[in-house]
Image (tube, helix red, strand yellow):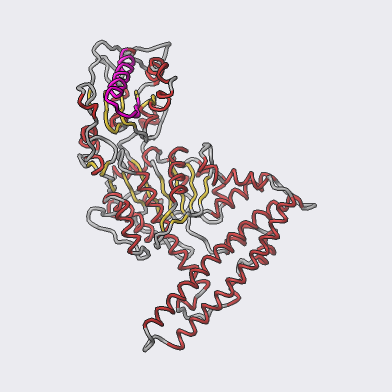
Amino acid sequence: MQTAILKPSPDHFPKYEQQSPAMPECFTPNFVDYLHRTFNGPQLAAIQWAATHTAAGTSSGVTKRQEPWPFTLVQGPPGTGKTHTVWGMLNVIHLVQYQHYYTSLLKKLAPESYKQANESNPDSVAMGSIDEVLQNMDQNLFRTLPKLCPKPRMLVCAPSNAATDELLARVLDRGFIDGEMKIYRPDVARVGVDSQTRAAQAVSVERRTEQLLLKNRDEIFGHIQTLKAREAMLSQQIATLQRELTAAAVTVRSQGSVGVDPEILLARDQNRDVLLQNLAAVVESRDKVLVEMSRLLILEAKFRVGSNFNLEEARANLEASFANEAEIVFTTVSSSGRKLFSRLTHGFDMVVIDEAAQASEVAVLPPLALGAARCVLVGDPQQLPATVISKAAGTLLYSRSLFERFQQAGCPTMLLSVQYRMHPQIRDFPSRYFYQGRLIDSESVANLPDEVYYKDPLLKPYLFYDITHGRESHRGGSVSYQNVHEAVFCLRLYEYLQKTLKSLGVPKITVGIITPYKLQLKCLQREFESVLRTEEGKRDIYINTVDAFQGQERDVIIMSCVRASSHGVGFVADIRRMNVALTRARRALWN
């Protein structure tokens, strides 16, 4: 990965246009049909490449096989279902990773069922058993737990808490789909929660740690005894299942397959598969019990006479334990550099960075330094980049993302080209000038009937209003700009829209008022003050800067450009900011 970052070579770049990736073997026909029903062509291609990429870089052993080019680049223009696609990617990446884990786990626990030459050792179940854990815990907690079979590991990052939590909420709400078309929810953890979203708090390693630290002595010791009993029961189940699998394998070898009734062969295979699935499930449950007990044993030292219990050390170990146990860890790119990640007993197989074009190259190095051999970068270099205050740093391309540098080096990207947001007239200009004319309308957008208010010549889908008497100005020594006449016009246009909708009996629609300048934002807020105090205004209207509006959308967008002189157009001259401004509207955009 280091070589790819420092010296990206066209010889190693993937050939997306020339190759069509095959579905991984672990995908059932029903699951493949589900993918085709749920995702459009470009989305599915990105998901298939991510799955193929994962399969190439996942190994069942300790070492990872380094392929020439470890990155997958997916460009998601506005309204193309980027978050939906990333959710699909996470699902298939997890399935591929989990299949490798499942196979290696069962080969280790039931070698006879995989027809390996070595005889199975019934004593192998004792590895990682509770007795061994308790025996070695005081010596070094984290030398014992890695003996448990490591599960798939994926790190999901974004530059902001909002983007990170949006993906986390999608995974928690929808879960994933497995090969049998059942919904399942992977073990996830959120590291570095600064937001207050319910989804993030529920799986926050910090919050879960604080809840554990509040437990008293009786609760801890009582729970330890319960876990001991459960571990003993699960270990016994594992031993029983292993014996049954070994016996079944011996029977198969003695009877053979030649001349055996096909129905009997099918029944034998089905019985073996059920036993293997049960074994994997019980081992997973046993491993969870061991990990949970390890956390309680950290706390138990607090009540032990003569122990050197250190609260901060205990807190750090508990947080690392929750992150270690998770199959998918969500965090921001900056939080991935926290000390917690240096405490993990094993790194990550895959890193997925969303909104990657909004993070500078330096910003994405911490997550890439955590051991992953594969990385998926999802973003859009045609939208706003990382914020850099220093002009000198900006001149030296500090705001340039790794995504953008790879793209400039000739690395192909997979473009999500079907848009589900904008009226065709609104989509036309951004598609032609920012995406080489490659954006197309989904059927849901193309087949939408015209809004009734389009009949009014002042409320067409895509209009520019020339405010000839408007003038830009400063205020109170601010370097920002305002245009009072434009702000007043925006209010009048909004009031005219509301009056028209009421006369036509049209249900309420959402409206966004955007501007490139913070001073104009304050001016707009003053003009709309009485509107924003009403219940309708609080619910249906949102006023903010273009930068703050990235990632959002409204039915109608009214944009105040502010600049009205021969000195240039200021912020709007940045084509990426212009692209964001022109792609927020679903049904009408008025500038």
Front residue of this view, candidates 352 and 130: 130
Report the magenta stretch's main SS: helix
**Quadrant assignment for the C terminus:** top left
13 sits left or right of 236 in the view: left
Residue 394, position as x, y percentages in the image: 37, 31
| Residue 176: quarter of image | bottom left
Front residue of this view, candidates 473 and 274: 274
Residue at 32% in and 38% down: 381
Residue 392, position as x, y percentages in the image: 39, 28
- Tag count in the figure? 0
Residue 53, position as x, y percentages in the image: 35, 57
Tell me, yes or no, whether the highlighted magenta stretch contains residue 536.
Answer: no
| Residue 403: quarter of image | top left
Residue at 40% in and 29% down: 548
Which region of the structure is painted magenta?
Answer: 485-512
Tell me, yes or no, whether the highlighted magenta stretch contains residue 506.
Answer: yes
Front residue of this view, candidates 385 and 290: 290
Q: Is residue 241 visible?
A: yes
304 sits left or right of 146 in the view: right
Residue 93, position as x, y percentages in the image: 40, 56
Front residue of this view, candidates 119 and 490: 490
**Above-or-below relation of 556 to 199:** above
